[in-house]
Image (cartoon, rainbow, N blue to C red):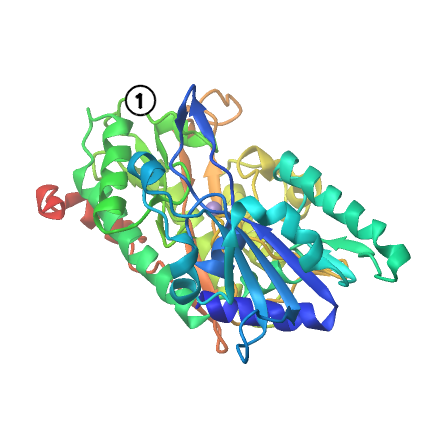
Amino acid sequence: MYHKHRERLLQQLAESRTAAVIPTASHKVRNHDCEYRFRPSSDFWYLTGFSEPESVLVLLPDGIASDEEDSKEIKSVLFLRERNPQVETWTGRRLGLELAPDSLGVDEARNIDELWTALPLLLKGYERIMYRSGLEEEFDREINGVVKRLRGLARGGIMPPIELVDTATSLHELRLFKTDEELALMRRGAEITAEAHRAAMSTCQPGMNEYEIDALLEYTFRRRGSTGAAYTSIVAGGENACVLHYVENNSPLQDGELLLIDAGAEVDYYATDVTRTFPINGQFNEEQRAIYELVLEAEQAGIDTARPGVEHKAIHKAALGVLVRGLLRLGLLEGTEESVHEDQSFRRFFMHGTSHWLGLDVHDCGAYTVAESSRQLEPGMVFTVEPGIYIDADDESVEARWRGIGVRIEDDVLITPEGNEVLTAGIPRSVQEVEDACKSGALETMV
Ligand SMILES: [Mn+2]
């Protein structure tokens, strides 16, 4: 799969006389001398499937001649760490230069320590260099140094690069369209995420704490072989649901309130992004149910809109239309449909977008607009549909019975040639399904 991704990008690079330099992420310090678990950069992972730090992929569409006779042209060079048994005892095993070509399918492996001396020679003669700046200052500086050295060769008749091009131009466009192999990983993520949300619904009881549910989600993700949560899980009981990026996850869960969970598994670094909202005691009250059913109707309208040829923004428009009509019907908004859209008074209750691309990054890459208009949906695109209603606990402009209710429902949708497929359809969603899932025994899901 990663080999195919490289081949596809190399084809595009060849057309524009571009070489690519794609570094992985660097270690991130958590505190003092402790680091977060390493996570490769998504661009690098997409092209290599290699998860060691301190590695850089260089793609050279013109190829370089190999030292060995009658061997193939070298178009992909992976710079990585040399094996070192003493160091590996402390910091972990390394693939090493010898095994990398066979194991990863790259044409050549070189020592990462030689990167900056080798790079000017490798990039010599290319008109453009694809590189995403702004991520690592030190790397940016070194790349600038390489470009400067290449300019120095101009007098010798070697044209220096005329442009640094961002990965957004072609690499991110490739990443936007998921292949069957990528979709298999995303389906696996959806399965694991379904199990985690079901476990949360069936286990949750009044008197528990948000952190217990957070731990249960993480446990379910990890025990099924996922790398863990694709992003920091939001486990928000009661009015905490009205804080959109609530991640403290440390409040007691109260009888009679809702629990909003925004959490998804990451499988081979592909993200799932799902939100469910359910009653802590297993039974919606009248107001909660009214809001829930309205958000569900809006989500369904968004999903029903999604098919090839439709603009991406139409999803938001469809969901928003349902929400506005519903909020007027419930008396939570005043005026007419037109006046509410005009004065944007819905923003008090629905202040975020309805959909974003999904893939290796939870807010995945790919342009949302093309030639200044919203992009048309095409088969292979995956995105979320996630409307919500959040009524502030202190909002005295609405009746007390509505206050503190926060509901979001979010699923992951794939555009198919015929329409769409909800990848996360296996997760309880209707009022009935959710209440049933809350009633099912807690322990059976733990085995
Ligand atoms: Mn989302």
The one nearer the camera, 189 or 245, is 189
Q: What is the three-letter code of the residue carrying label 1?
A: Ser
The residue closer to the viewer here, 406 or 20, is 20
> Residue 212 appears in which quarter of the rendering?
top left
Tell me: residue 142, above or below residue 120. above
Q: Badge 1 is on which residue?
A: 251
* View extreme (right): residue: 155
Q: Residue at position x 62%, y 40% from top?
A: 135
Mark 1 within 8 Å of ligand 1, using the beta carbon: no
Give the residue drawn at x 42%, y 24%: 400
Report x, y in % for residue 423.
38, 62
Of the pair 373 and 314, the residue shown nearer to us: 373
Q: x, y percentage for residue 350?
A: 54, 39
| Residue drawn at point x = 33 percent, y = 56 percent | 190
The answer to which of 235 and 53 lies nearer the viewer is 53
The x, y position of residue 177, in whole percent, is 53, 66
Q: Is residue 115 visible?
A: yes
> Where in the figure is residue 141, as x and y percent of width and height?
70, 38
**Displayed quadrant of residue 17:** bottom right
Q: Secondary structure at mark 1?
A: loop
Residue 192 located left or right of residue 409: left
Judge whether residue 271 can be spotted in this image.
no
- Residue 328, relative to residue 119: is it above or below? above
Characterize the local packing of mark 1: few (<14), some (14-19) or many (20 or more) Cα atoms within 10 angstroms.
Answer: some
Q: Is residue 425 left or right of residue 182?
A: left
Task: Write the residue at 87% across / 59% down.
Answer: 156
In the rendered image, the vertical position of residue 57 relative to residue 222, given as above or below: below
